[in-house]
């Protein structure tokens, strides 16, 4: 079967859970005997051939910064990519037997449906997130937020088969009027299945790993650690990642006099993130918006429990069993988060052992490989 994958980012040139998902899915489909083309933006040096493992990679628009200075996705990049997808699909209208793509950035989905109008082929759409009308207003303001929500709703209506990774966004799709039932994919964890090292005797280190954007509330970490140290004076934080909130974070650390307590080295390689999880007593994810929360599973793979905040846009809370592999704080505010972090640290080895057991029970169910095999089988049956 000739399958086209469509996503504007491509691992390892951009790094994230979705990038790793589409690369892993492409590999699984190719290994299953399918002919796979990955349509994306050009993010690699001109002289390089990014194709891999029998997967042809095609750039249909120029690469460039995806985010504005304040951390929002650039609309011009989404429009340019959508136009590139439309041109590619029109030129290759009869070249594919199925298309699998990400709903976001939204303009590529109308492009695919327009170019392939009249061709009765499967078009699968991954919906990592479905934003509420209220969140669109908060994110873009009144008029632009209303337009953003209208475009999202159009894409929901254009989705013939939806795939999701959380119950939250499955329900949101139904509320937005999606056709048919969304198919829940098991997970996105692509790390090694290995025995967790000894989890006893860890220092009270709290780790954050992720992009420094407003939604992830990375600036809550300094005041949270300040409160935690009132109960656990040895506690300190390691904040990994980069983004538009980084300068403000460093300023907050300095103003609170926490330079010797909060270490924020910026972007680090995956091995350094894993090393941090293996040394930490707790992982803190104060986000108010998560489409999945892969970092919760990655921390659990190292026996490290996670503190998340309950919220109407936070699907990461679905991955935390309260008291089993972490704590769900009532809200994303310093007092609630600090209380949860203190509890996790004070429960010590027992909670870390429970977290390691939770991962051992769920690792296969939450794996990217299982999700990819499930999709490969569906497309093979369609063929």
Image (cartoon, rainbow, N blue to C red):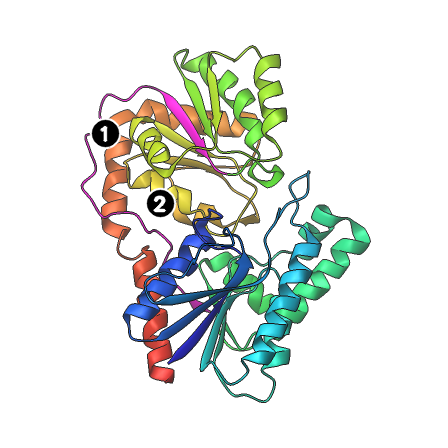
Separation of marks 1 and 2 at Cα, in angstroms: 16 Å
In the depicted structure, whether residue 31 falls above or below residue 169: below
The dot on residue 227 is none
Membership of 190 in magenta stretch: yes
Could you tell me which quadrant the C terminus lies in?
Answer: bottom left
**Depth order, front residue of 237/337:** 237
In terms of image quadrants, where is residue 358?
Answer: top left
Which one is nearer the viewer's eye here, 277 or 356?
277
Q: What segment is highlighted magenta in the picture?
A: 183-210
User: Magenta segment: does it hold 239?
Assistant: no
Q: Is residue 7 visible?
A: no
Which image quadrant is residue 352 in? top left
Position of residue 30 measured from the top left corner of the image (x, y, whole percent): 33, 69
Residue 4, relative to residue 66: is it above or below? below
Residue 129 pos. (x, y %)? 55, 57
Residue in the image at 63% along x and 69% along y: 155
Placement of the N terminus among the 4 image quadrants: bottom left
| Residue 374 on image: x %, y % | 33, 69
Task: Tell me whether the residue at label 1 lies in contact with that at label 2, contact meaning CB atoms closer than 8 angstroms.
Answer: no
Which residue is found at the position 52% from the left and 42% from the top? 310
What residue is pinned by disc 1?
A: 199
Considering every residue shown, the one lying at the far right of the view is 143
- Judged by its main secondary structure, the magenta piece is loop
Q: Is residue 271 left or right of residue 74?
A: left
Kindly identify the residue that appears in the image at 40 percent across and 58 percent down: 23
Give the total of numbered labels.
2
Q: Is residue 90 left or right of residue 54?
A: right
- State the residue position of label 2: 297
């Amino acid at each position: 079967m000739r399958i086209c994958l469509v996503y504007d980012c491509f691992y390892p040139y951009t790094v994230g859970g979705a990038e790793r998902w589409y690369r892993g899915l492409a590999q699984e489909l190719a290994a299953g005997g399918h002919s796979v083309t990955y349509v994306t933006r050009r993010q690699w040096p001109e002289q390089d051939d990014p194709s891999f493992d029998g997967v042809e990679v095609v750039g249909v628009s120029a690469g460039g910064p995806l985010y504005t200075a304040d951390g929002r996705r650039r609309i011009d990049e989404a429009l340019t990519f959508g136009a590139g997808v439309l041109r590619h699909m029109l030129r290759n209208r009869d070249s594919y037997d199925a298309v699998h793509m990400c709903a976001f950035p939204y303009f590529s989905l109308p492009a695919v449906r327009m170019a392939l109008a009249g061709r009765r082929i499967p078009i699968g759409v991954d919906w990592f997130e479905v934003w509420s009308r209220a969140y669109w207003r908060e994110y873009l303001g009144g008029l632009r937020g209303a337009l953003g929500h209208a475009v999202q709703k159009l894409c929901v209506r254009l989705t013939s088969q939806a795939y999701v990774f959380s119950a939250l966004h499955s329900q949101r799709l139904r509320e937005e009027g999606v056709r048919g039932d969304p198919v829940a994919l098991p997970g996105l964890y692509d790390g090694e299945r290995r025995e967790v090292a000894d989890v006893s005797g860890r220092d009270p280190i709290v780790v954050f790993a992720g992009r420094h954007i407003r939604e992830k509330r990375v600036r809550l970490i300094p005041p949270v650690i300040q409160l935690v140290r009132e109960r656990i004076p040895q506690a300190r934080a390691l904040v990994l990642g980069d983004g538009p909130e980084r300068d403000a974070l460093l300023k907050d650390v300095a103003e609170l006099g926490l330079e010797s307590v909060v270490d924020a080295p910026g972007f680090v390689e995956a091995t350094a993130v894993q090393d941090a999880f293996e040394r930490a007593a707790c992982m803190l994810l104060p986000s108010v918006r998560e489409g999945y929360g892969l970092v919760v599973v990655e921390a659990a793979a190292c026996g490290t429990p996670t503190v998340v905040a309950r919220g109407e846009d936070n699907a990461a809370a679905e991955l935390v069993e309260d008291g089993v592999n972490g704590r769900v704080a009532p809200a994303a505010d310093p007092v609630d988060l600090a209380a949860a972090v203190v509890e996790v640290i004070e429960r010590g080895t027992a909670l870390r052992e429970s977290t390691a057991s939770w991962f051992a029970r769920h690792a296969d169910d939450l794996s990217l490989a299982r999700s990819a095999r499930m999709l490969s089988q569906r497309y093979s049956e369609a063929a």
